[in-house]
Amino acid sequence: MEIYIGYTARDSVSIAGLDIEKYAYQEYTEMRQGLVLAINWGFDGLLGLTPPWNTDSIGYPTYTSRLLQQDNLEEKVFSTKFPRFLHEEGEFMVGDSNSDLYTGEFRTIKALDDAEGPGTYEGRWNVPISSITLNTSLPLRLPTPNCTAVLLSEAILALPRQFVQNFTEIIGAEPFSWWWQTVPCDRRAYLPELTFEIGGHNFSINAFDYTFEWEVPRDGYGIMCVLAVEGGEMDGNDCIGLGTPFLKGFYERFDLKERTIGFAELKR
């Protein structure tokens, strides 16, 4: 992980022709590696996309709350498509969704307010989650009645520790460092899917989603497929983190007015 140091700035922001005047944002001047072998993702800026109805904790309007105020935006939505492979590009769209990138209808989940459900993270996109299943010949299913799932921008799935231990053993993940585990890239097509029951819908991702391709900056390693899953203690009043390994398996539509998140099948 990285530690970013900087300050709050205020300026005009223009994204895809949409201008927001006097927008307050975080500008970093220094980045420090927080872990040995931590990856520098190469960010040159961070655009906060937290829900617009949870701004009290930060004291100034977020980008999404300013989007709601735009008269020239017909639909108060933004949509995301995350890259699944190394050197593949994603897409961020404001005001609509790109039908060239998905197929079928959106399955829509109502976002939870901060006070709803156990383990909600303040100012985040929280959704209800009922279970996690590893779809092996004898499925490994974990009910999560006292958990909430929070959608994250980090490249990680944060799941209950014992489930992760069973999961990594079943798929044969091997330690690369004290922090990362890997699987052979050519085995991904044969590894089981993970299914998350969220808001009454089942969402499945495969090994091309829950791993990420990393071009190791060392001679002799090449591209490795790193398992983007970490285990944590779930004490019955906690949350599960669904980062980009989950999000890149779908096309997302965040509706700021209706407070919903829609998930559609990607065009492959």
Image (spheres, helix red, strand yellow):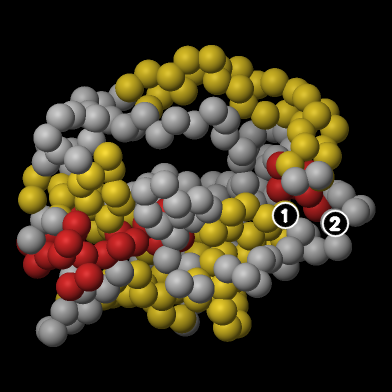
Q: Quadrant of the N terminus?
A: top left
Q: Answer whether residue 120 is visible to the viewer in this image.
A: no
Residue 192, quarter of picture: bottom left
Q: Position of residue 79 (x, y in %)?
A: 63, 60
> What is the count of numbered marks?
2
Q: Position of residue 131 (x, y in %)?
A: 33, 74
Q: Give left or right: position of 67 versus 236.
A: right
Dot 2 amino acid type: Leu
The residue sitting at 68% across, 55% down in the picture is: 93
Q: Residues within 10 Å of mark 1 (few under 14, many from 20)?
A: many
Residue occupied by mark 1? 94
Give whichever of discs 1 and 2 has the lower sequence position.
Answer: 2
The residue sitting at 78% across, 25% down in the picture is: 11
Q: Position of residue 179 (x, y in %)?
A: 18, 38
Q: Give left or right: position of 68 versus 91.
A: right
The residue sitting at 76% across, 59% down in the picture is: 95
**What's the distance in space between the residues labelled 1 and 2, CA to CA?**
8 Å
Residue occupied by mark 2? 73
Q: Give left or right: position of 247 versus 22.
A: left
Q: Quadrant of the C terminus?
A: bottom left
Pointers 1 and 2 in contact (C-beta within 8 Å): yes
Q: Which residue is at the front of the view, 51 or 1?
A: 1
The residue sitting at 46% across, 23% down in the picture is: 4
Q: Which residue is at the front of the view, 232 or 24?
A: 24
Dot 1 amino acid type: Val
Q: Position of residue 71 (x, y in %)?
A: 92, 53
Q: Give left or right: position of 29 versus 255.
A: left
